[in-house]
Amino acid sequence: MALYNFKKIMVVPTAKDFIDITLSKTQRKTPTVIHKHYQIHRIRHFYMRKVKFTQQNYHDRLSQILTDFPKLDDVHPFYADLMNVLYDKDHFKLALGQINIAKNLIDNVAKDYVRLMKYGDSLYRCKQLKRAALGRMCTILKRQKQSLEYLEQVRQHLSRLPTIDPNTRTLLLCGYPNVGKSSFINKVTRADVEVQPYAFTTKSLFVGHMDYKYLRWQVVDTPGILDHPLEERNTIEMQAITALAHLRAAVLYVMDVSEQCGHALSQQLELFNNIRPLFANKPLIVMANKCDVRKISELSEENQACDRLLAHRVDTKMKTKKVHDVLNRLHLAVPTKRDQKERPPFIPEGALLRRKAMEMDAPKRKLERDLEVELGDDYTLDLQKYWDLMNPEEKQDKIPEVWEGHNIADYIDPEIMTDLEQEEELREKAGEYVSEEESEDEEMQEIRQLASQIREKRKLKILTSKEKDTQGPRMPRTAKKVERATLEKEMADLGLDMTDKDDSHYALRSRSLVRKRKREVSAPPTSRTRSQSASRPPRDQSGVRDAKMLKKVKTMMKSSQKEMNRQGKKGESDRHVFDVKPKHLHAGKRKSGSTSRR
Amino acid sequence: DHHERKRKKESREVHERSHKARKMIGLKAKLYHKQRHAEKIQMKKTIKMHEQRKSKQKDDDKTPEGAVPAYLLDREGQSRAKVLSNMIKQKRKEKAGKWEVPLPKVRAQGETEVLKVIRTGKRQKKAWKRMVTKVCFVGDGFTRKPPKYERFIRPMGLRFKKAHVTHPELKATFCLPILGVKKNPSSSLYTTLGVITKGTVIEVNVSELGLVTQGGKVIWGKYAQVTNNPENDGCINAVLLV
């Protein structure tokens, strides 16, 4: 539907702007640097590109204009006619035709000049040709100035047209100027049409929307129509006529009973008869407006004739009109009679019976649902009322849980006690309730004692470690030096005899103490025992008998490393060669690798 | 509120324009300033014209023709001398037999400019063929010589049939078909080939103009001289020789 496209038409630039835009675009988007000494094909290509780029831009923009504007043959005849009335169909088509011609001319120019540029043998010649081509294209466009201006104005006006959908339900207001059509639409819809005492206040069509019976209705307000033949009508009136002619709507012919518009009732009647052919096939209502000023009953005898043309009030008017509208669309299709045999519609037996039953019977029993609906909030689900008791008055009594020392749940089933007793016997036999006696011998007892000791010790250790505040990284146990005193104390606690242990391996004096003697005579050396690492000799002394052998070992190590160090190797496994094929050994006449020196 | 907004927009335009003019740089600025300069000149002219209406001006038409100021009264009028010198020049020209053409002197085009050497042969060594690099005209019934024997190649892309001819008195330009090349000022070879360069005299079909001789016969061919470089502009502009 062409409705929305009217707002989406791209802006049509003026001729001057159009040229400026395209030329500056060419200058920005194509490469700009070229020198005389470049190869000729490169120069040619450079300038041909500019010509083609400009042509492409013009072509694109002009085609877009051509496609954006609605084709009068493709839109709804209402819009086609309206545009003809407003913008003159011939002028419109001519303008678009001119644009099309300009587009083709520009294409031809570009083609010719590109062909000529192939023979350009110097930068100057190619440049002049490009200049000529661009200049020609711009002159073609300069000539289209008028068309472009006209199209821009058309576009602006088109985008401001009210969106009238010719296919939905529409009410059309028509009548003389100043009879009250705009006031009516203002009242009925949310539209805000200007209402003034002078005639032809409304100069174009206005649309309002309203709701009736859950449906959207369009109300179209037209400028007033004067009574003269079609050829003499001006643009404003023609819009109203167009709307009348093409929109399938219910027509409201508004008459001013009080003659405040300046035209007598007879004149209004004349007009009505004149435009009657336009009302063919449309439901018609004649509205008598401004009844508050002059009541219908006050009309004189000759005016009564007009009243016979159904003067209704606004509300009743609605209903009849809509029904007519709908009736127009409904049609019951009946198959034509083939022969004399009667073929009434077929209804199966069951359906007929049920229909009869439905009509006669009331619902048999009252459902819970019905009760719920009745009671509303007070409803509670009371299943106790369905119990079958000997004494029906006891239905609503509360049941106790314990009575006279007995658990009532036990007595629900009279057999339940016997069942329970049977189960108990079974369980006893299986031996569930027998608890085993613990026969412990001495071993077990010892183990138990030890276990309890361990547990205690562990707890103590946990407590002590929690109390300790740890500073720095947590070192493993083997890295710490253990004091001799603590070691002996711990062992003593466990029951070991720790007296007289001075020449044990852990009581050796540490080496560091000997060295430090020169510096400080501070705290008396406590013989510290190193952990396991102290007890082993260092690796370069293990397996060495005496100092002489040690010296020899050291010299051997150093001599083996000398060669590697000299060659800059990382170690004995480094076999990297920095220069695999040095040039001086391989180049020249003596080159096949047999040269080790030069 | 369309009118309100329009009014405000127009009044803001002045400020925006001055801001733009100050801030723009580069090529856009050059173009804009050139355009603006032209506009301002026009504005100044109109203002001046308005002012003229108010002030009183000396009317130049009131002084009659030939009226000389007092200090020149005893000298002879200049006009006569001018006529005499023109007559002499005319006689000289007639003696020389030159035509009166709009462009009497034209730069000569050398062969290297007009004809390009085309190499042919199995090893591209033979260089006897030439291709015309300027715009040329070939007649209607023109057919090429067999390609093996043709010495001068006139490419189809450079063949033109129409020229834009200006009538010097009417100051109107028409697009007329060319009938032939009468004379190329650079060389007679070019004339026979039909090469059209600046200054070439061509014959054009003027039946469109509807000129009639005194005897009543319709003129349908006239000479015109080419005034531009057709190979640079892509079109032939000529001035009719009346």
Image (tube, coloured by chain):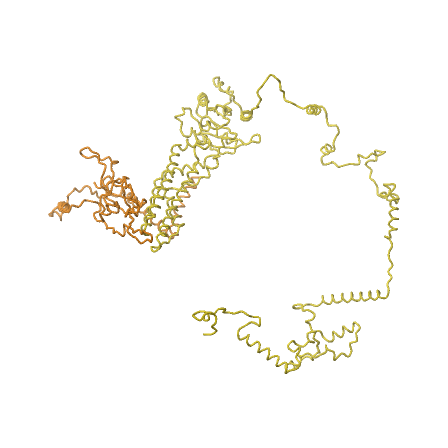
Taking the image as shown, residue A111 lies to the left or right of residue A372, namely left
Q: Position of residue B208 (x, y in %)?
A: 26, 36
Q: How many marks?
A: 0
In this orientation, does residue B19 appear? no
Answer left or right for A345 relative to B3.
right
Residue A73, horizontal then vertical, whole percent: 43, 32
| In the image, residue B18 above or below residue A253 | below
Q: What shade has chain B been given? A: orange
State which quadrant residue A102 falls in: top left
Going by the image, does A513 lie left or right of A44?
A: right
Figure quadrant of residue A317: top right
Residue shown at the point (40%, 32%) measured from the top left: A89
Placement of the C terminus of chain A among the 4 image quadrants: bottom left
Give the image location of residue A546, x and y in percent: 66, 82
Camera-nearest residue between B18 and A158? A158
Residue B169: quadrant of the picture: top left
User: Residue at 20% across / 43% down in the picture?
Assistant: B60
Viewer can see residue A292: yes
Viewer-side residue, A296 vs A572: A572
In the image, residue A591 sits, relative to residue B136, either above or below, namely: below
Q: Is residue B201 left or right of residue A122?
A: left
- Residue A387, position as x, y percentages in the image: 81, 35
Residue nearest the viewer, comparing B61 with A594? A594
Image chain in yellow: A
Q: For this rendering, which residue is in front, A167 or A134?
A: A134
